[in-house]
Image (cartoon, rainbow, N blue to C red):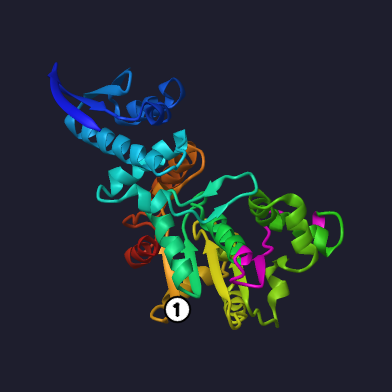
Amino acid sequence: MKKNSLASRGNSQRKLAFADNELVQTLFGQQCQHLRIIDRLLHIKSNVRGNEIILEGPEPALELAERTLAELYGLLQAGYPITGQDVQYALRIIRETPDTDLKAIFLDTVYITALKRRITPKSLNQKLYLQAIRTFDMVFGIGPAGTGKTYLAMAMAVAALINHECNRIVLTRPAVEAGEKLGFLPGDLFEKVNPYLRPLYDALHDMMDFDKASQLIQRGVIEVAPLAFMRGRTLNNAFVILDEAQNTTSEQMMMFLTRLGFGSKAVITGDITQIDLPAGTSSGLKEVRDILTGIEGISFVFFNKNDVVRHPLVQDIILAYERHQQQKHRPSSGRAGGTSRDDHAREENFR
């Protein structure tokens, strides 16, 4: 890649040139849609001339755009098929951690789905999460919705099963009512709790052929069950995922953590901002960090709004709710029932 710096009307200009004409078409995107994403997010202008591009805008934005394009071009050279979402993720990563090597993140393929889609981390925290799962026997992934906590854990579990690193996968969730009563649902116990387990089935079927997944479930190689069904069991040679762990009580959390048997790995995921337990009931996930700190073989990975890999609006929604909660819990002089400074500090530190 060649570059030149020019000056124009108070803004800076940079001309970048890429050697491979075929790769540059993918880099720019169909009808230059990838460049339009960079223009919109960095408030710059880009003009394409063959395999060259002229960028115009404030110098810091041009530095970021140039670095992003260079890193994405390197990914294409390595055989990674970038998408519009990848452009957004790459820009976010480089903006937050300029020294990060995108190849170390995007080329860390966890699993290739039945539809030949690569599952890879899309943020630095997701990369650290995968490293923790590979290294430790018990990993807690804590953070807001849409950060890939459960999905990446599921991909790691399926890959471990395919590679004969475990004999079975156990997926579980607490069947906690979020404003709706189980008794009002039709059917037997299984039919009542099945809707609470549906997100786990959805993630599983996104990675495996439906018939193959169904056969493995029927044979008991993959088990999807409510948390209550884990009591009294010992899970050996298994990859175990506890999802929505913020809705476990202290007793349920201890019960689950002590199910782990020889040759097993456990991943516990949850979002402490979305607790559906009855008022006055402590969340086992909120307590567990203090209880298990310092135990060898256990790792905690914390996600934030910058790790969201869903629709871009999800990140904005999470940020808006965070601001609302901060205003809601801000101490006010002479106001009864206000959150203490110590309580607020603990909440912020836990995030």
Residue closer to the observer: 182 or 266: 266
Decide which of 342, 113 is in the foreground and name it: 113
**Tag 1 residue:** 297
Q: Is residue 235 left or right of residue 215?
A: left
Q: Is residue 172 on the magenta stretch?
A: yes
The mark total stands at: 1
Q: Secondary structure at mark 1?
A: loop
In this image, 192 relative to 40: left or right?
right
User: Who's the residue at 45% across and 38% down the image?
Assistant: 82
The image quadrant where one finds the C terminus is bottom left
Residue 178 at what x, y percent from top left?
A: 65, 55
Q: x%, y% of residue 6?
A: 14, 22
Q: Quadrant of residue 42?
A: top left
In front: 162, or 98? 162
Residue 222 within the segment the image draws in magenta: no
Label 1 crowd bin: few (<14), some (14–19), many (20+), radius 10 Å: few
Span of residues in magenta: 161-184
Residue at image point 38% right, 24% down: 36
Q: Position of residue 28 (x, y in %)?
A: 39, 27
**Considering only vertical position in the picture, is 322 above or below 21?**
below
Q: Please state which of residues 98 and 281 is positioned toward the viewer in this rendering.
A: 98
Residue 172 image point, x, y percent: 66, 66
Q: Residue drawn 39% across and 47% down? A: 306
User: Height in image: 159 above or below 261?
Assistant: above
Seen in the picture, residue 9 relative to 206 is either above or below; the reply is above
Q: Quadrant of the N terminus?
A: top left
